[in-house]
Image: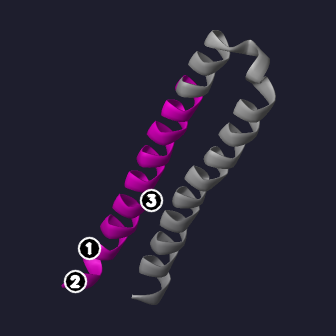
Amino acid sequence: MASEWIPMGAGLSMGLGAIGSGIGIGMLANGALQSLGRNPEARGPIQQNMILAIAFTEAIAIYSLVVAILILFVL
């Protein structure tokens, strides 16, 4: 009975993780581009911090992938 909901849970986990990560990266890029438009001389620190924040945001999507794989193959 519960085994028929396992693929749905895995898909929901991955889908929400990907949507959240995509929205987060979009907001990060928006903020970085606005900052660059206002202060082009600060390109280096803005770019460095943006790349670091994008890496952390992508980690959320990877965690949701791991959770989806665990749901599919462990439960």
The quadrant the C terminus occupies is bottom left
Q: Which mark is residue 14?
A: 3
Please say whether residue 24 is one of the residues in the magenta stretch: yes
Residue furthest toward the bottom?
74
Residue ID for mark 1: 5
Dot 1 falls on a residue whose secondary structure is helix
- How far is disc 1 from disc 3 in space, using C-alphas? 14 Å
Q: How far across and down, in percent of the image, does residue 4 sit? A: 27, 76
Dot 2 falls on a residue whose secondary structure is helix
- Seen at 69% across and 48% down, the residue is 52
Q: Which mark is first along the chain, 3 or 1?
A: 1
Indicate the amino acid at tag 2.
Answer: Ala
Between 23 and 3, which is closer to the camera in this rendering?
23
Residue ID for mark 2: 2
Between 63 and 5, which is closer to the camera in this rendering?
63
Which residues, given as a range, are shown in magenta?
1-30
Contact, mark 2 vs mark 1 (Cβ under 8 Å): yes
